[in-house]
Amino acid sequence: MRSHLLNGLTAGHYRRSVTEGVERVAARLAATDRPFTGVTADDLAPRIDGIDLDRPLGDTTAALDELEEVYLRDAVYFHHPRYVAHLNCPVAIPAVLGEAVLSAVNSSLDTWDQSAGATLIERRLVDWTAARVGLGPGADGVFTSGGTQSNLQALLLAREEAKTDDAARLRILASEASHFSVRKSAKLLGLGPEAVIVVPVDQDRRMRTLALARELERCRREGLVPMAVVATAGTTDFGSIDPLPEVAGLCDRFGAWMHVDAAYGCGLLVSPTRRHLLDGIERADSVTVDYHKSFFQPVSSSALLVRDGATLRHATYHADYLNPRRAVAERIPNQVDKSLQTTRRFDALKLWMTLRVMGAEGVGRLFDEVCDLAREGWRMLAADPRFDVVAEPALSTLVFRYIPAAVTDPAGIDRANLHARKALFASGDAVVAGTRADGRHYLKFTLLNPETRPADLAAVLGLIAGHAEQYLGESLDRAS
Ligand SMILES: *Cc1c(COP(=O)(O)O)cnc(C)c1O
């Protein structure tokens, strides 16, 4: 069994095993003609449950053969041009290489004595990103597991910086299109359900700043403390970007921490043509970026950035066994002092390899391509009488629905769209997302694959219309 542990003596086994796995994945990627096979949980569960975990196969090839059956064959493949559902990207090869290196070396980013150079590489990338945001010389941050954790930490810092000890008076303001992790964070921070004030959005799904101003005034009148305003730079559904300069002005006026959730929109930081869409982000107190969304990085790769690095002290605890207080005086860089996590992956290496091979502009150009594709898709939808499209995209999502000529009953239209999405998923021909807008069911394209062509969008729209029409035809038959 020792031969399965990676060390200097097992280098040959390591090389052969990993290469065999890489070959399998490469073959699978090349052979994939649909994003999904349409397998159901009921189909797969018996295959997975039938495996006796107490009887190992003892052999890499056999384990990979088995893995084909339970995972590789039926996985949902984000690299396929007709996977257009969620905020998942095809991954950059240099990042995948980084992933292989980081898990083999297995540095842990909590302390210098478990990471050495890895800590400094992460710090460089934090500084690089903070400079792109424009946060100024006092900025700092840390890599996290994702936007959810980044938002939680940002709101923790905001709460600790708030000028009250009375938690019942604390309020967080976020738009109705903001991410649900804002509400989840409020709960984790021990705040009540009324702590998050939902600010309405305009028809482009951007926070209404007049409404924000009114809510801030109301907080002041009622003795409530607006501990943070969360501006979303790229809402999950619409890619809409809240008016950052206006939000910044209001945060200044009312003494609120400005958090910008740029989990999705962070790709604009490297865009050669669209960086201006983030103007105002440099006034934030904290910023969430998800490289695993718009920087083409594998999950997970994310960071929280703060204007004033000293605020990260609210996450600092010392342990004699890990990061004793004296390490600070000795200027030993221990990232755990800034993180909610302890043992932590060297995810930064993926971004590092990406920047060293492709460069920031290379990444930004890819993100620009998918934003261009979304505009093309919007023109297509707006010109197509079979569909209703919600908002002109600022980034790379399209929210739309099929509107049958024959049916006027809103519930029937909802059902037809829900059915079309399910039927499409079951066919595996394409994967689209669904959401609600203005109380009705909609479908959603999230475009993060530069290989997706307008012709793919047209084909997927044709499939959606076909499934919806078939459903409506059948329900008319049933009715008659
Ligand atoms: C995806 C997303 C998040 C959550 O990020 P995870 O990496 O999935 O945890 C937060 N905010 C926005 C706007 C998002 O789109």
Image (cartoon, rainbow, N blue to C red):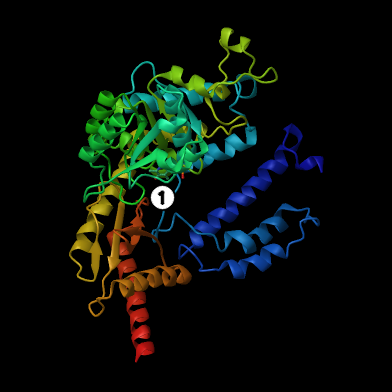
What is the tally of numbered marks visible in this picture?
Answer: 1
Indicate left or right for 11 with 246 as reference.
right
Closest to the observer: 351 or 244? 244
Instruction: Give the amino acid type for the residue marked by disc 1 in the picture.
Output: Leu
Residue at x 26%, y 47% (from the top left corner): 201
Q: Is label 1's Cβ within 8 Å of ligand 1? A: yes
Residue 114 is left or right of residue 78, and the answer is right
Image quarter of residue 283 = top left
Q: Is residue 317 above or below residue 356?
A: above
Q: Mark 1: which secondary structure? A: loop
Establish if 285 lies above or below 433: above
Image location (x, y in percent) of residue 237: 34, 51
Q: Where is residue 36 drawn, in percent x and y? A: 49, 64
Judged left or right of residue 465, residue 111 is right
Task: Name the image quarter holding residue 53.
Answer: bottom right
The residue at 61%/12% (across/down) is: 327
Residue shown at the point (32%, 35%) measured from the top left: 270
At label 1, counting other C-alpha atoms closer than 10 Å, the crowd grade (few under 14, some 14-19, many 20 or more) is many
- Most extreme residue toward the left is 383
Q: Mark 1 points at which residue?
A: 87
Residue drawn 36% across and 75% down? 467
Q: Nearer the viewer, residue 425 or 281?
A: 281
Q: Quadrant of residue 257?
A: top left
